[in-house]
Amino acid sequence: MTSFPERRRSPPALACLRPEYRADSQLLNRLLARCERAKITLTGLRLIMLHGLLRTGENVTAVALWKVLMEIVDGPTPSAGSIQRNLNIFVDRGILTRTVGADRIWRYRIAQGMEPDGPTVLFIDAGTGRMRPCDLPEVTSFLHRLAERRGLDIRSAAITLQMDTSQPLS
């Protein structure tokens, strides 16, 4: 049985990635642009994970990704906990989608079709009618994930907000 030490290791840098295992630059650049739009800080570990995710393909488990990273990284590999934590961040921001199989194991794949041309979600002030683009990537990624699960395509969405006048402003 694989054991995972409790101590933290220094995160791998992109220089630790073996050159023959680098991902296709076009796919990687598109994925990096999506991460930037989702306001994800691209640490060395996350960059290496993106290379590993592009290498493994569809429906990868966290353990399978960890094994791939052991193969493609020179030096110590990241811990399983760090990989899982970063996979959760990628899912929360809409970069990856997570499914649960009959065996109750999470499987991850790169989310498709989540690159809107412009702001598709608007906040509308109920009092003034003023519209503002949604600047919260969590709301946008949630709506896109919801639409993907239901087999829908979001053209645009609007969230109407009204200020609660019964509560004093602080």
Image (cartoon, helix red, strand yellow):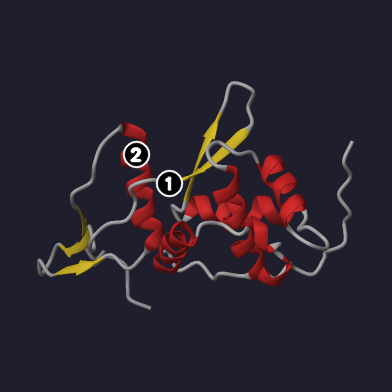
Q: Position of residue 98 (x, y in %)?
A: 52, 40
Q: Which residue is depicted at the point 79% across and 70% down?
A: 10
Q: Quadrant of residue 30?
A: bottom left
Q: Is residue 99 left or right of residue 130?
A: right
Q: Nearer the viewer, residue 66 or 102?
A: 66
Q: Position of residue 56 (x, y in %)?
A: 60, 43
Mark pair 1, 2: CA separation: 9 Å
Looking at the image, do the residues carrying marks 1 and 2 touch, with CB atoms under 8 Å apart? yes
Count of numbered circles in the view:
2
Using the image as rendered, state which of residue 150 and residue 64 is in the foreground: 64
Q: Amino acid at mark 1?
A: Ala
Which quadrant, please, contains the C terminus?
A: bottom left
**Outermost residue to the left:** 129
Q: Residue at x 71, y 41 (%)?
A: 63
Examine the rendered structure and indicate whether residue 111 appears above or below residue 164: above
Say which residue appears at 79% left-offset and 62% top-offset: 74
Q: Residue furthest front?
A: 20
Element carrying mark 2 = helix
Which residue in the structure is indicated by mark 1? 111
The kind of residue tagged 2 is Glu
Taking the spot 18% from the left edge, 49% from the top edge, the residue there is 155
Q: Earlier in the sequence, mark 1 or mark 2?
A: 1
Q: Residues within 10 Å of mark 2 (few under 14, many from 20)?
A: some
Front-lying residue, 121 or 50:
50
The residue indicated by pointer 2 is 148
